[in-house]
Amino acid sequence: MAIEPFVKKYLRQRVLPTIWCGGCGLGTAMRVIIQALDDLKIDQDNLVVVSGIGCSSRMAGYLDANTVHTTHGRALPVATGIKLAHPELEVVVIMGDGDGSAIGGNHLIHASRRNINLNVFLLNNGNYGMTSGQVSPMTPHAWYASTCPFGNLEHAFHLCDMVKSAGATYIARTTTFHYMQAVRLAKEALEHKGFSFLEVYFQCPTYFGRFNDMKDAPTMLQWFKKNAVRYNPEKPRELEKGQFYVGKLWEDNTKDEYADLYRKLCKRAKEMMQAAK
């Protein structure tokens, strides 16, 4: 099958094929991001992709841009430093559910609170897929993983609610089944000035799926289709067990962006120092 030129444009051909398992949704998620970048004609020389550690974080190695593969959970502080030093750059942060909600959870809260102009794509497969399917903070309650064969006793984070309460100004959720919606939301996130957070549910049949009676990708994609509910802020509804909202969940264009405030502070401090001479 021929690969579209715009896909090749954004990939480092020399490092392919990817390490991802057959049926994994990360290839779809990466294409969503690539298509959004291409549709918006974002200059690759002006694009920075920062990731942490995990299956999804390998994406920084495949995308042809200025890329930084950081340590586990530390993608956001590195991205924050880059954005403060070079606010003209388009900074995309790619994290997994463990990378963003466990070891990196504190950074996620405070990056949201600051409302710095970063584009966060949190790719959620409900487990630590890179290290054999252990339970993560996003594994649903009573579902199974390699470290909870009798069912997960803990309750998962509601990450979109959490980043909203912390101060993020663009929040959305989608799945790898909802491809066109995912591209639209990714473009909205990239165009928003402020902290953008897009959570993408993607299938992991190798570990999460087979522990939970969904042993192949089509079965998991059908589960996404069945349980996704399109969010309508004018007509909110009570979700049934297992259901989740998809779509744009929140946007606030009134809050000052942190890098702008930082630049203004630096300018004011410089003026005060000059006046004091």
Image: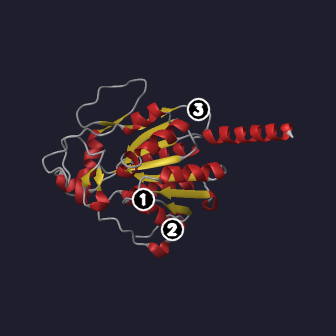
Q: Which amino acid does label 3 sit on?
A: Asn
Disc 2 designates what residue? Answer: 8
- The residue at the point 45 percent across, 39 percent down is 109
Q: Which residue lies furthest to the left in this view?
A: 150
Task: Pick out the residue farthest to the bottom.
Answer: 14
Q: In which quarter of the image is the N terminus?
A: bottom left
Residue 15 sits in quarter: bottom left
- Mark 2 or mark 1, earlier in chain: 2
* Amino acid at the residue labelled 1: Ser
The mark that comes first in sequence, 1 or 3, is: 1
Please name the amino acid that badge 2 sits on.
Answer: Lys
Secondary structure of the residue carrying numbered label 3: loop
**Which is more toward the observer, 223 or 80?**
80
Residue 57, which numbered label?
Answer: 1
The residue at the point 53 percent across, 67 percent down is 5
Q: Where is residue 144 in the image (x, y as percent from the top left)?
A: 18, 49
> Is residue 255 shown above or below 222?
above
Q: How crowded is mark 2: few (under 14 residues within 10 Å), some or many (20 or more)?
A: few
Distance between the alpha carbons at the discs numbered 2 and 1: 19 Å
**Is residue 47 placed above or below 19 in the rendered structure?**
above
Q: Name the residue under label 3.
A: 253
Estimate the spatial distance between the alpha carbons at disc 1 and disc 3, rounded to whole Å.
29 Å
Density class for disc 3 (Cα within 10 Å; few <14, some 14-19, many ≥20) is: few
